[in-house]
Image (cartoon, rainbow, N blue to C red):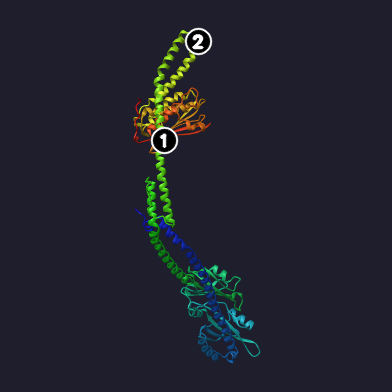
């Protein structure tokens, strides 16, 4: 099944054109990413600055409440009603003043012992004799702020303010107090119109979260996160940071720490957090919008490249490729049919057509040269065959007669006579001539190959067994490898007699190369198409200068050898359409590899009969 993406993009040139156009947009994508990153950093900085300004405003509002409370209580403490500790008059004033100060939940007046004189609303304040802030105010004679503490009547956190009342002689005769509820901060928080999921938190130096908006009920008067406390009560009195809140939302926080006049234990810190997702929503929207536009532009450009590539490049390239495929398939008359203009493709087409024409001309010349070489080789082979037949027929009878007569004369000659040595010399040379005649006759009388299907493992294994008797006395170790000697593994169409003769010659040649002993490796393998028969030795090797003449008739480096056996092997290999490779290194040995096709040979030519 064709991949739909490949079917859409088409041939590789078109796809490369599209990739090239797409690559041209990569710098734009990089610039877009860089712009988005810069915009994110600017937005984060702006949000941090905004958050810090908002929390500073909230802290300032809280400080203003404290200042207003100090001023209010100080003013009331100077009135004659409170300086005279007139319970009825003070009760009326407190009732009138409380609604005018919504940040306060209660106002009260106590004598020097802490006994309650007046309060608003009635019953909201009890005796102050057990309160620390009351005693501090009595001792110092100055405005005093108590510690933050949970509200008893309902959820919330309150703080007490105390202002001493002195008479004309400067004696402290009572204390005027006010109860401030931190829930008034919710109005400041709401009026700021902050983004959704923004939070305002107030934490004291003990790490207690005094209040939080929203979810006040859940997070009031509970310990704050340690990492938040570490940041807010560190060296800096204000700042901004990025952190994950108790609800798991990641926010940009701004904080402002406020030091109360009552000492370090009364230090509080305001923290305002705005969600990062909300802060970065606009840059991300812009980024996605621009990215979509860039992607659309890239798609349109790729489509235009597809069209232009089809009409200006691809169709012409297809003609060029088709001509190249025809040329590669052997059609030397293939031409592109394109004009030979001045553009690159036209010049390429012209170069291709010129190359094809040159190849056609050279192929024609090469064919003619090969035909001439084959004719000369055939003449050489025919001459060699004729010579071999002449030697075999014309010399056999005289040599045989000379050998027979020499043997008769040797029997009639005295053993110590000088003529006996002459006759034995004549007899030895005659035997050598008989060997030459025999081998030349075998070369000349090779039968025409008659292939039949044979089990190579079994056939060559039996031939190898015959040579084991010759190898052992010579100190040669025989190693059989692969399928040699194993029936049913490798089968091929061969002339059994000629294959046996070839194998025996190669093995005998290997044994002759190891007169002092060595290792003879006999192997048989198969790659599914051809059988590989290997004969390797660890003998003296073949010098490089002798390799070109290795298979020439009558070439040999051995004493008392004719030099026709390897020529016979080469002739058998050629007529069977086999292959024969030789790998040899002087001093390390040689390996002959015979390649035999498994199928029946095609177009075997019968050898011409002798005249």
Tag 2, which secondary structure? Answer: helix
Please state the horizontal and vertical placement of residue 204, each as a whole percent of the image: 56, 74
Say if mark 2 contacts mark 1, CB within 8 Å. no
**Viewer-proximal residue, 224 or 438?**
438
Judge the density around disc 2: few (<14), some (14-19), many (≥20) Cα neighbours within 10 Å: some
The reply to whether residue 485 is in sight is no
In the picture, the quarter occupied by the C terminus is: top left
Which residue is denoted by mark 1 in the rendering?
373
Dot 1 alpha-carbon crowd within 10 angstroms: few under 14, some 14 to 19, many 20 or more: few
In screen coordinates, is 113 left or right of 152?
right
Q: CA distance from mark 2 to mark 1?
A: 53 Å
Q: Earlier in the sequence, mark 2 or mark 1?
A: 1
> In the rendered view, does 523 fall on the left or right side of 453?
right
x, y percentage for residue 508?
45, 26
Instruction: Looking at this view, name the residue that lies furthest to the right.
Output: 169
Q: Which structural element holds mark 1? A: helix
* Residue at image coords 51%, 8%: 417
Q: Which residue is mark 2?
A: 419
Q: Nearer the viewer, residue 285 or 276?
A: 285
**Up/down of 411 relative to 155, above or below:** above
Q: Single out the mark in the foreground, 2 or 1.
A: 1
Residue nearer the viewer, 254 or 327: 327
Q: Residue 275: tell me if it is visible.
A: yes
Q: Position of residue 96 (x, y in %)?
A: 51, 89
Could you say which quadrant of the image residue 179 lies in?
bottom right
Image quadrant where residue 59 sits: bottom right
């Amino acid at each position: 099944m064709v991949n739909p993406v490949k079917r859409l993009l088409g041939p590789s040139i078109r796809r490369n054109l599209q990739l090239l156009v797409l690559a041209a947009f990569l710098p734009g994508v990089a610039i877009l990413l860089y712009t988005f990153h810069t915009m994110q950093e600017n937005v984060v900085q702006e949000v941090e600055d905004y958050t810090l300004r908002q929390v500073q405003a909230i802290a300032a509002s809280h400080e203003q409440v404290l200042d207003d409370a100090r001023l209010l209580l100080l003013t009331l403490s100077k009135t004659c009603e409170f300086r005279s500790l007139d319970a009825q008059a003070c009760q009326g004033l407190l009732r009138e003043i409380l609604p005018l100060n919504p940040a306060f939940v209660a106002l009260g007046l106590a004598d020097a012992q802490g006994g309650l004189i007046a309060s608003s609303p009635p019953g909201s304040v009890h005796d102050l004799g057990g309160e620390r802030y009351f005693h501090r105010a009595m001792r110092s004679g100055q405005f005093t702020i108590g510690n933050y503490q949970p509200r008893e009547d309902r959820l919330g956190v309150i703080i007490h303010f105390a202002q001493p009342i002195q008479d004309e002689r400067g004696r402290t005769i009572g204390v005027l107090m006010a109860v401030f509820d931190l829930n008034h901060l919710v109005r400041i928080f709401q009026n700021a119109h902050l983004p959704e999921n923004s939070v305002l938190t107030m934490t004291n130096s003990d790490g207690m979260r005094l209040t939080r908006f929203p979810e006040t009920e859940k997070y009031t008067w509970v310990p704050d996160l340690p990492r938040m406390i570490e940041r807010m009560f560190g060296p800096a009195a204000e700042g901004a940071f990025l952190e994950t809140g108790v609800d798991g939302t990641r926010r940009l926080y701004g904080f402002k720490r406020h030091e109360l006049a009552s000492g370090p234990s009364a230090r509080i810190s305001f923290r305002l957090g705005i969600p990062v997702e909300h802060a970065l929503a606009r840059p991300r929207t812009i980024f996605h919008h621009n990215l979509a536009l860039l992607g659309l532009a890239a798609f349109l450009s790729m489509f235009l490249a597809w069209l232009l590539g089809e009409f200006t490049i691809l169709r012409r390239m297809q003609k060029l490729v088709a001509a190249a495929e025809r040329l590669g398939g052997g059609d030397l008359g293939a031409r592109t049919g394109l004009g030979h203009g001045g553009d690159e493709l036209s010049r390429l087409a012209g170069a291709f057509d010129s190359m094809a024409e040159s190849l056609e001309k050279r192929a024609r010349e090469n064919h003619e040269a090969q035909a001439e070489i084959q004719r000369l080789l055939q003449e050489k082979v025919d001459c060699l065959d004729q010579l071999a037949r002449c030697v075999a027929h014309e010399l056999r009878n005289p040599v045989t007669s000379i050998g027979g007569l020499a043997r008769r004369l040797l029997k009639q000659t005295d053993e110590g006579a000088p003529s006996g040595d002459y006759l034995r010399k004549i007899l030895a040379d005659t035997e050598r001539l008989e060997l030459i005649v025999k081998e030349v006759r075998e070369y000349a009388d090779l039968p025409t190959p008659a292939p039949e299907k044979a089990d190579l493992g079994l056939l060559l294994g039996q031939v190898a067994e015959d040579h084991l008797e010759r190898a052992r006395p010579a100190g040669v170790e025989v190693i059989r490898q692969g399928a040699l000697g194993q029936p049913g593994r490798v089968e091929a169409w061969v002339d059994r007699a000629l294959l046996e003769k070839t194998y025996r010659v190669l093995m005998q040649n290997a044994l002759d190369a190891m007169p002092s002993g060595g290792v003879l490796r006999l192997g048989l393998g198969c790659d599914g198409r051809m059988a590989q028969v290997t004969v390797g030795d660890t003998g003296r090797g073949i010098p490089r200068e002798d390799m070109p003449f290795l298979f020439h008739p009558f070439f040999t480096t051995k004493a008392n050898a004719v030099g026709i056996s390897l020529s016979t092997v080469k002739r058998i290999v050629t007529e069977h359409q086999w292959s024969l490779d030789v790998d040899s290194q002087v001093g390390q040995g040689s390996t002959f590899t015979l390649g035999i096709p498994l199928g029946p040979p095609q177009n075997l030519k019968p050898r011409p009969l002798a005249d």
